[in-house]
Image (spheres, coloured by chain):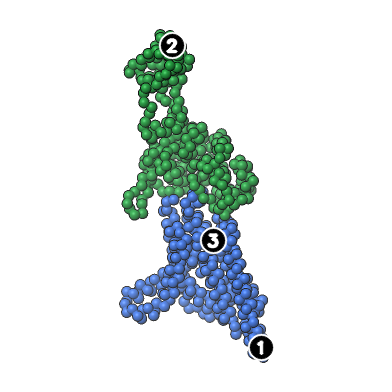
Amino acid sequence: MKVIEVHDLTKIYQTRLRKGNVVALDGVTLEVEQGEIFGLLGPNGAGKTTFVKALLGITQITSGTALVAGLPPQDPLSRSRVGFLPENHRFPSHLTGLGLLEFAGRLHKIRPGRIHERADSLLQLVGMEKWAGTRLRKYSKGMSQRIGLAQALMAEPDLLLLDEPTDGVDPIGKVEIKEVLKRVREEGKTVFLNSHLLSEVESLADRVAILSKGKVKRIGTVDEFTRRSLRYEIEAAIGNERIDIPEKIGRRISITTKGMTVELIKEEYINQIIDQLRMKRVMIRSVTPVKITLEQSFFETLTGAEEKPA
Amino acid sequence: MKGIARDCLVEFMDRKALWIFVAAILFGIFIVFVTRSIETHVTIESSGTMNLGDISEAFGNPILRAYNSFVSFIVFLAVLASVGLFPRMLERGRVDFYLSKPLSRASLLLNKLLGIFLVYGGAVVASGLVIYLAIGVVHGVFNLSLIYLLLMSLVSFFVWLSITCCFGVMSGSPVMAIMAAFILWAAQKVLAAREVIKAFLDSRIVDYALDFTYYVVPKTSAISDLFIALASGREVSDWMPLWSSLLTSAVLVFVAVWVLKRKDF
């Protein structure tokens, strides 16, 4: 079941002085399935926050369609089972941590008895029970993020939209937030994650999209992003042997006395390379498909650059 | 609804707005006590021929006027204390919290308006009641018609609230909201003397423009006079200031909802 369905979504901000319009989203199309953690990546100004705000109806859509749980963002019911942690949030500072959760619960029309139960368990979950009675204005950035995550979870949401959830959180807090998100996924809920922290997304997300200048540059599973297509790392005692890779089967990326990296046109050509090495009596220790980090993949997608052959 | 109204109360307490009203009440009580000595003096001059009831009747109108001034002052304080609440709710980073919840923008704004009206209007009425009791205890005047002025204070507060709501939502700035309220207050004072202006400017167009503006601009001073007349037991022949002001308020609230619905955050 699709929790988010967006087709050809465009958002144009009209500047007040009519000096020109700003295209924040330019024909974005993507779908998010129930139960997955979806990461939206992109440089500053790519349109990530605008995208989330468009899903929630916080910003108006210029053209295209967006559906959240099958409903358009203009319908308040589309937000009834959605939790949202905004970036750079400023929750009502007159409230305490507990007060914020209770207020969020009331706005979600949760019955009073359930609000208290839920608030207590969430305060425990995000490790904020000691600070429940403290006003939000006295919270550090990390504490604000934790309580923000708790308020987003108040309505037991089917979809959790998080904009930079670990921003300002210490390393221990980051690990704890990751654990919370994993638990949310185990419960079959969907998590939509906007983040600059690529390692965080890599370790959490099932699928990822890269947004740049309002357009989706690439979309796929984390494995698809991090696996170099048909690139292999061969660990072998090559020494000074000359290993030729014919152009028709692929190219050599790098070579040392202890091994080499090749990129092939077809997967089966790896056997030809192995045959060549065996003919030359080179001891082969391992042949591994090359994986890159999501960070590398991200930069390559955005800049179009890749490693140059040796 | 209850959630937002309760939040308005929490915000009211946290902003220490309560103390503004407490200070105003204490000031009011002080004035009530000061005026008590004036009354004592009158009693001596009358050589004991006047009873307390006669004194309250003789001074009924001044008490009514003084009470009206106090209540108007409390309304002014309530407007000042609440003027920033709409722009603050719509601040970047804060509005996301509200708009991500399953309620429409119209219901968010109307609930906030109602919450502020109940909490701050409640503070106005409570302040008025305390001073009413103080007048009763000190001067022996328990004139129930003074309650009309409490009703007037609520109407007046609602009118000002609709103005600060509309301009607060449109501009996102408490300064702009209070400036708009001040300009409209000044305009109603000027327009109250429109017949004098008309006499100076011999132009039909200006006459129509002045009349039209007079009907459109909320008339809290005229509403105040109208309720004083009611409290004095006089007959009110023209309710226009009341209904036209309430109509303008309704339009302003409608405009605020319309603007908020179209706003991008």
Q: Amino acid at mark 1?
A: Ile
Q: Amino acid at mark 3?
A: Ile
Disc 3: which residue: B116
In this rendering, the answer to whether B4 lies above or below B49 is above
Chain identity of mark 2: A
Asked if residue A287 lies left or right of residue B154, the reply is left
- In percent of width and height, residue A23 lies at 36, 45
Q: Earlier along the polypeptide chain: callout 3 or callout 1?
A: 1
- In percent of width and height, residue B51 lies at 66, 86
SS for dot 3: helix
Which chain is drawn using blue? B
Rate crowding at label 3 as few (under 14), some (14 to 19) or many (20 or more) other CA atoms within 10 Å: many
Disc 1: which residue: B44
Select label 3 or label 1 by which is in front: 1
* Image quadrant in which the C terminus of chain A is located: top left
Q: Mark 1 and mark 2: span between their CA atoms?
A: 126 Å
Image quadrant assignment for residue A233: top left
- Which residue occupies the foreground of this view, A98 or B117? A98
In this rendering, the answer to whether A167 lies above or below B264 is above
Rate crowding at label 2 as few (under 14), some (14 to 19) or many (20 or more) other CA atoms within 10 Å: some
- In percent of width and height, residue A274 lies at 42, 13
- In percent of width and height, residue B218 lies at 45, 69
SS for dot 1: helix
Disc 2: which residue: A282
SS for dot 2: loop
**Do discs 3 and 2 belong to a common subunit?**
no
